[in-house]
Image (cartoon, rainbow, N blue to C red):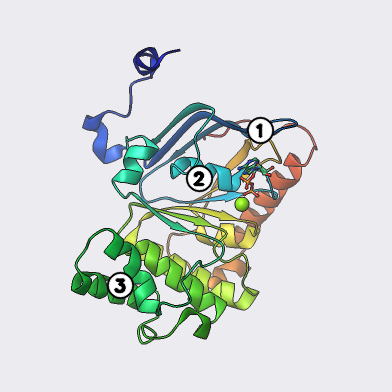
Amino acid sequence: MNAPDRLAALPAAPPVAAAAAQAAVEVRRASVVYPAPDAPVHALSEIDLTIAQGEFVSLIGPSGCGKTTLLRVIADLEPISSGEVWVNGLTPQQARLARAYGYVFQAPALFPWRTVLANVMLPLQIQGRPKAESEAVAREHLGRVGLGGFERKYPWQLSGGMQQRVSIARALGFEPKILMMDEPFGALDEITRDGLNDQLQQLWQRERRTVVFVTHSIAEAVYLSTRIVVMSPRPGRILKVIRSTLPDERTLDLRDTPEFMALAHEVREGLAHGHGHGPGSGHADE
Ligand code: ADP
Ligand code: MG
């Protein structure tokens, strides 16, 4: 199909009139095949997923099931082989150019020769914002992740958890509409992770920014999410989407409640189901 035909064939793109109810992310029948010299890798197969504004959606699934690929597809870091992706009614590329995304990687990726403040200021300065303004914004966001007072430290003087908070402050600096987080706490010890989960939950409660979050941890997914997307081993498919029954306002002691345990159980069952014990439910959208 040539380009004009393809455009003509697109289903009604999310209409402008529906802006208020416009989905933050719409993924339709999206597949990704990585070319490889021996056999191509089918990383994602026919993904259908709609994320509403302000949702906190976690992607959970075994290693190599395509979680990172899906994040990268949404954030315009990876092209799809077929299907469609819309972000706030725009193509991922348009959304990226409109600075819709903040991206937090598993490793903090901070520059060791720059102070904490200078690391958070960097993307703002690259954007061409004046230095004084960049500094004010950076200080504000460091404060929001509980790092007021650490501006003049260097990354190597901070713990892993604090470094990851610096990356979160950096991602939030230009007020992205969507925060993309790829196993941001995966390398941290459990106690540190608990603390950061709690902070991230509070941040989300305050700002209601759309978050797409990748994790291996069932407890983390259940604690943080409004919906949990369970993915199958490669080629990544959506097996199940679980809507949280927990209240939006959460504290860590919620993890001892029967509701929390029931949700964790449901996620675990979904994951086990994907490991070759019969087909998934196949209903990605509820
Ligand atoms: P996850 O984040 O769930 O661990 P990924 O999205 O990183 O999974 O990878 C999905 C699959 O695609 C894996 O089998 C991985 O080896 C493969 N893959 C990822 N990136 C590439 C690439 N650039 N080229 C070829 N294969 C890739
Ligand atoms: Mg990954």
Residue 107 or residue 74, whichever sits in front: 107
Give the crowd class for mark 2: few <14, some 14-19, many >=20 residues within 10 Å. some
Residue picked out by circle 1: 281
Residue 217 is labelled as: none
The image shows residue 203 at horizontal and vertical percentages of 39, 67
Tell me which corner region of the image, top left, top right, bottom left or bottom right, holds residue 219: bottom right
**Which is in the foreground here, disc 3 or disc 1?**
3
Asked whether mark 2 and ligand 1 are closer than 8 Å, the reply comes as: yes
Kind of residue at disc 2: Arg
Mark 2 falls on what kind of element? helix
Quarter of the picture holding the N terminus: top left
Query: What amino acid type should be assigned to the residue bearing mark 1?
Result: Ser
Q: Residues within 10 Å of mark 3 (few under 14, many from 20)?
A: many
Task: Please report the residue visible at 57 percent of the width from the left and 73 percent of the height from the top.
Answer: 194
Tell me if I can see residue 270 in this picture: yes
* Residue linked to disc 2: 72
Give the side of residue 149 with respect to residue 279, left or right.
left
Q: Position of residue 124 (x, y in %)?
A: 29, 63
Instruction: Please give the residue where the numbered disc 3 appears in the rendered image.
Output: 138
Using the image as rendered, state which of residue 272 and residue 165 is in the foreground: 165
Tell me which label, 3 or 1, sits earlier in the chain: 3
Q: CA distance from mark 2 to mark 3?
A: 25 Å
Spatial CA distance of label 3 from label 1 is: 45 Å
Alpha carbon separation for disc pair 2 and 1: 25 Å
Give the residue drawn at x 34%, y 14%: 4
The local crowd at label 1, few if under 14, some if 14 to 19, many if 20 or more residues have their Cα within 10 Å, is few
| Horizontal relation, residue 189 to residue 171: left or right | right
Q: Residue at x 58, y 77 (%)?
A: 192
